[in-house]
Image: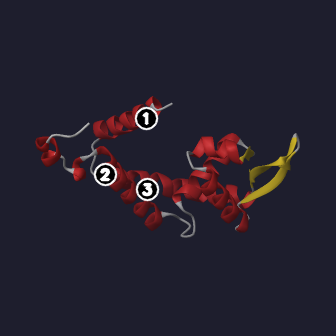
């Protein structure tokens, strides 16, 4: 299958959904790093801590599902959070091959400090969008993400 020349000439990569989503995510990540209450905490680490708060002690497979982070990445995130004593690891009582990740008191305290910062980060990420546009973009992103399951 070939693309005719007129389609190829009118295709603007900078106007495509993937490019625009990537730029929006890069912008959000930069805003997160500039406004996080803890300069060492990344947005993916924050999401992982939130998942543990919401779900309780979890296996890495459960964290992968909750965070949409791949296995190799979640392993590194958990190790970095453990090194900072934000999570603790223990063997799964029902399957000694599995590791259970649990939020520590320090992790809970950091989350409590981060929530107001995270709310501000979301506000800054939405930028100049009016209330209707904010509702629309969140609705559309959820719809796009739900359609792939």
Q: Is residue 41 left or right of residue 88?
A: left
Q: Quadrant of the N terminus?
A: top left
Say which of marks 3 and 1 sits in front. 1
Q: Give the x, y percent position of residue 89.
A: 79, 56
> Circle 3 sits in a helix, a strand or a loop, which is it?
helix
> Circle 2 sits in a helix, a strand or a loop, which is it?
helix
Among numbered discs 3 and 1, the one appearing first in the sequence: 3
Q: Is residue 74 visible?
A: yes
Q: Can you say whether 70 is above or below 62 in the image?
A: below
Say which of 82 and 64 sits in front: 64
Mark sitting on residue 19: 2
Q: Is residue 132 left or right of residue 47?
A: left
Mark sitting on residue 1: none
Q: Give the x, y percent position of residue 45.
A: 59, 58
Give the residue at the far left of this rendering. 6
Q: Tag 1: Cα neighbours inside 10 Å, few (<14), some, or many (≥20)?
A: few
Q: Give the x, y percent position of residue 50.
A: 61, 49
Q: Is residue 53 visible?
A: no
The span from disc 2 to disc 1 (Cα, nearest Å) is 18 Å
Q: Is residue 36 left or right of residue 64?
A: left
Report the residue at 47% width, 65% height from top: 33
Q: Which residue is mark 3?
A: 121
Report the residue at 66% width, 65% height from top: 80
Report the residue at 35% width, 36% height from top: 135
Q: Which residue is mark 1?
A: 142
């Amino acid at each position: 299958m070939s693309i005719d020349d007129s389609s190829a000439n009118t295709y603007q990569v900078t106007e495509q959904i993937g490019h625009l989503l990537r730029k929006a995510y890069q912008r959000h990540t930069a805003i997160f790093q500039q406004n996080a209450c803890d300069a060492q905490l990344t947005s993916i680490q924050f999401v992982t801590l939130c998942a543990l708060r919401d779900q309780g002690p979890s296996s890495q497979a459960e964290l992968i599902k909750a965070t949409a982070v791949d296995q190799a990445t979640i392993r590194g995130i958990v190790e970095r959070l453990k090194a900072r004593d934000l999570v603790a690891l223990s063997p799964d009582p029902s399957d000694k091959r599995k590791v259970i990740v649990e939020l520590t008191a320090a992790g809970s305290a950091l989350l409590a400090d981060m929530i107001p910062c995270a709310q501000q980060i979301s506000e800054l990420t939405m930028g100049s969008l009016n209330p209707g546009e904010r509702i629309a973009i969140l609705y559309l992103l959820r719809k796009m993400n739900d359609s792939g399951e």
